[in-house]
Image (cartoon, coloured by chain):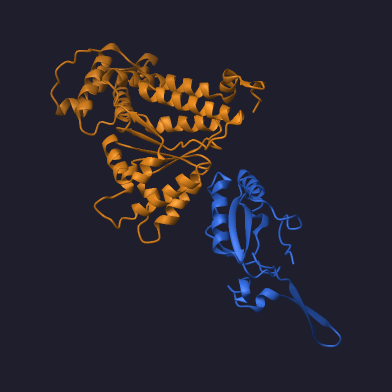
Amino acid sequence: MPETVVRDDALDVGQAFRDSRVEEVLEALDRDLVGLTGVKTRIREIAAFLLVDRLRRQMGLEADRPVLHMSFTGGPGTGKTTVALRMAQILHRLGYIRRDHLVVATRDDLVGQYVGHTAPKTKEVLKKAMGGLLFIDEAYYLYRRENERDYGQESIEILLQVMENQREDLVVILAGYKDRMDGFFGSNPGLRSRVAHHLDFPDFTLEELMRIAQTMLEQQRYRLDDPARVAFGAYLQRRMALPDFANARSVRNAIDRIKLRHANRIYSGSGLATREELERIDAADILKSRVFLAMPAPAPPSDVI
Amino acid sequence: MHITQGTFSYLPPLSDEQVRTQVQYMIDNGWAVAVEFTDDPHPRNTYWTMWGLPMFDVRDAAAVMLEIEECRAGNRGCYVKVNGFDPSPLRQGQVLSFIVHRPTVDEKGYRMTRAETGGQVIGYALNPYAADQPAGKRYARNGG
């Protein structure tokens, strides 16, 4: 790392920022992720705080290492894992973790089936994640209020111990639905007090989902024609009303199914397909979806796409 | 007597920071790191007790340091060593091994015994003084 000291009593903040190459990650975050303004702002704030903390250290203002454990709350498909990956890059570039790797774990990976199985299992995952970032998805499943002999509690205790004693070696991100995470932290105050940053991921709006779909299709070299775009908007409106709607993930799955129908239409067609046809998705490919069969059209929204 | 077995054994004992650096070197080479302990320091004793399984999928030395620390705490009166196993097809063997912990009381040396066999031939045997005590009591304070 190049020395950033300009004078004895001044540091070049801009230079330090450029040296850390964090801006690239932050820009990529802005560019690649649609919406999520609140989350992006918080991440910028955290990055700025960590950079300043590092400068303070260089100036000899010794302080405890800042607590970096975080909680990401939000519905499924709102970008929690994607942001966690970027967070690993940011923390690594700022030197708060030694390598930019992310280990994703759920209850199944941490909690054992019988007495004495949990501790080695949890430790195994923790060891794998050491030096980097551990992302625990749907963390509230670790704690089962209704069963006090559940092994999840044991896992939480080991987790707490490592989160406290090995802050240098491991950063933990706990993720899940907002309301359930609140309940989880409520019944595990020890965990709440060790989590420094709470980031909330709001559900995407219809317009944001359209932009996400557009980006995904462009990446895969497909194109919606105008009727198809209207049909996709109508599809999304219906899909969003269904209980299992999972934001960007649902959009991705919908696109996968639309691609299947598109391929099927071409396959059963006349035999000749132009480049334009291979690229273009028709309204018919979208309107065959089951959501159009099961549900009547909702009232047209005010912001027509 | 300072037991000399494995790599670095003629150097002063490694500090934790030095051990960590060596372990990270092993991980970066793609070697699996294992922790083992014993209280039988005979040089021919190749079967040390494994402290957990070899760690094949750790990326950072911190995980190994955690195990070393636990093994030390649980086996104060033992030798603890770290092995590096290279799983690549050409080697498939242990490539680095060094002691990271020694018994906290005096390390005892070896007794050499001579045995006259047929004719004037003399056979030699090496016995660790520690092995006079039953396992588990060899390096305990006050002899027991």
Q: How many marks?
A: 0
Q: Residue at 22% across / 25% down in the picture?
A: A288
Residue A67 in view (yes/no): yes
Q: Is residue A92 left or right of residue A69?
A: right
Q: Is residue A25 left or right of residue B132?
A: left
Furthest residue toward bottom: B119
Chain A drawing hue: orange
Quick check: A136 above or below A243? below
The image quarter in which residue B5 lies: bottom right
- The foreground one among A21 and B85 is A21
Instruction: Please identify the quadrant where the N terminus of chain B is shown.
Output: bottom right
Q: Residue at 27% across / 41% down in the picture?
A: A183
Q: Residue at 71% across / 68% down in the picture?
A: B43
Where residue B12 sits: x, y (%)? 74, 55
Where residue A280 sits: x, y (%)? 34, 16
- The foreground one among A79 and B11 is B11
- The foreground one among A291 and B85 is B85
Quick check: B88 above or below A180? below
Q: Is residue B139 left or right of residue A137?
A: right
The image quarter in which residue A191 lies: top left
Where residue A80 sits: x, y (%)? 37, 32
Where residue A58 sits: x, y (%)? 61, 29
Chain B drawing hue: blue
Residue A136 in view (yes/no): no
Quick check: A6 above or below B112? above
Instruction: Please identify the quadrant where the C terminus of chain B is shown.
Output: bottom right
Q: Residue at 26% across / 20% down in the picture?
A: A206
- The foreground one among A216 and A207 is A207
Furthest residue toward right: B120
The image quarter in which residue A209 lies: top left
